[in-house]
Image (spheres, rainbow, N blue to C red):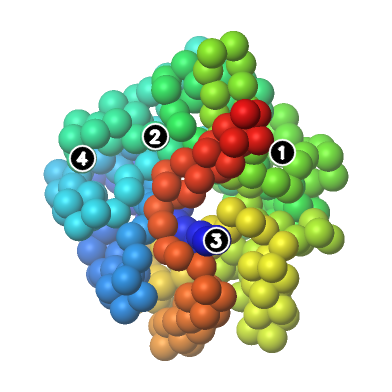
């Protein structure tokens, strides 16, 4: 049996606006309610990666706690969503992961066991920190040549902001060419960490829901089918922007938000069609933690 997981990097409007006081973020209410309807329709549980600082607000904590009670996995997306996280010094990196780790554990009642770095900015130091904190898996590797145009677009989106210079201060710019495309177990002494790279086909082209907006439905569908065929441990990555509509954006806050040129009905159809394709591939829906467990079990059988 092959598996598929559906995960959400919860890049909030609250974070995009700089965590302003008194701001009520629709990411945690109406936007996520749209995503949850798809989980009900296709009968799966999301793996949702939370920015720890979002949990400073009571209403956000209540929403995340409710998702956990519904059975969705809650993972760690760092404390402040620093865009070159992997380039941090180890102590700062540890604090970014641990602070968010503790906030999530206090919110949902269990420690997160999965992590994804902001903008997939990873490094050996980050993996060391995750192993020290007992993480079971990391999904920060992006072994695709699509990283380069995506970084260029990110630079355009953040031009003039404090994040602009941080975007290129990475330690993984060689990953699109040299990193493994395959899920694997990384070991260091007695510790181990499952790496689940962004699903990438043999031509090093990745698929996640953003590619449906980048390439259009026809090419996205071809890419999605290609990765479903090529990637044994498959997952499909979503972002709140995929179901955020123009009225969710505060008009007084000037920001360049992705995908706002698409009507919500178009976005909902793109997601519905994509999830339908994953479901029709005959894969069993699981959480990312369950997917990582399957990778570890496969590796253990090969070692034996």
Q: Which mark is residue 83?
A: none
Mark 3 nearby-residue class (10 Å; few <14, some 14–19, many ≥20): some
Mark 1 nearby-residue class (10 Å; few <14, some 14–19, many ≥20): some
Disc 2, SS: loop
- Rounded to the nearest angstrom, the CA distance separating label 4 from label 3 is 29 Å
264 to 99, vertically: above or below: below
- Rounded to the nearest angstrom, the CA distance separating label 1 from label 2 is 28 Å
Q: Earlier in the sequence, mark 2 or mark 4?
A: 4
Residue 133 is left or right of residue 229, and the answer is: left
- Rounded to the nearest angstrom, the CA distance separating label 3 from label 1 is 36 Å
Residue marked by disc 1: 168
Residue 69 percent across, percent down from the top left: 17, 51
CB of mark 2 within 8 Å of CB of mark 4? no
Visible residue check, residue 78: no
Residue 252 percent across, percent down from the top left: 36, 64
Residue 246 percent across, percent down from the top left: 40, 76
Residue marked by disc 4: 108
Q: Which mark is residue 2?
A: 3
Residue 135 percent across, percent down from the top left: 44, 28
151 to 75, vertically: above or below: below
Q: Earlier in the sequence, mark 3 or mark 2?
A: 3
CB of mark 4 within 8 Å of CB of mark 3? no
Residue marked by disc 2: 113
Farthest residue in the front direction? 304
Q: Which of marks 3 and 1 is in front?
A: 3
282 to 89, vertically: above or below: below
Quadrant of the frame with the C terminus: top right
Work out whether residue 1 or residue 175 is closer to the camera in this orientation and state it.
Answer: 1
């Amino acid at each position: 049996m092959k598996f598929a997981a559906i995960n959400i990097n919860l890049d909030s409007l609250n974070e995009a606006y700089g965590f302003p006081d008194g701001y009520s973020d629709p990411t945690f209410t109406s936007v996520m309610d749209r995503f949850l309807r798809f989980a009900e329709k296709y009968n799966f549980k999301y793996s949702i990666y939370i920015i720890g600082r979002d949990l400073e607000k009571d209403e956000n904590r209540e929403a995340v706690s409710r998702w956990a009670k519904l059975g969705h996995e809650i993972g760690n997306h760092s404390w402040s969503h620093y865009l070159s996280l992997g380039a941090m010094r180890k102590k700062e990196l540890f604090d970014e992961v641990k602070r968010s780790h503790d906030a999530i554990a206090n919110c949902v009642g269990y420690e997160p066991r999965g992590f994804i770095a902001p903008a997939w900015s990873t490094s050996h130091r980050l993996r060391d920190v995750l192993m020290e904190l007992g993480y079971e898996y990391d999904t920060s590797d992006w072994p695709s040549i699509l990283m380069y145009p995506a970084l260029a677009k990110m630079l355009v989106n953040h031009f003039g902001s404090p994040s602009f210079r941080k975007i290129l201060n990475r330690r993984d710019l060689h990953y699109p060419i040299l990193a493994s495309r395959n899920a694997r177990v990384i070991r260091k002494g007695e510790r181990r960490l499952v790496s689940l790279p962004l699903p990438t086909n043999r031509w090093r082209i990745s698929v996640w829901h953003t590619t449906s907006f980048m390439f259009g439905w026809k090419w996205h569908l071809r890419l999605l089918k290609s990765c479903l065929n090529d990637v044994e441990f498959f997952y499909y990555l979503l972002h709140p922007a995929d179901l955020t509509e123009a009225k969710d954006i505060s008009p007084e806050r000037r920001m360049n938000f992705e995908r706002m040129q698409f009507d919500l009905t178009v976005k909902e159809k793109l997601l519905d069609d994509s999830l339908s394709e994953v479901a029709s591939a005959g894969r069993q829906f699981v959480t990312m933690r369950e997917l990582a467990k399957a990778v570890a079990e496969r590796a253990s059988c090969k070692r034996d």
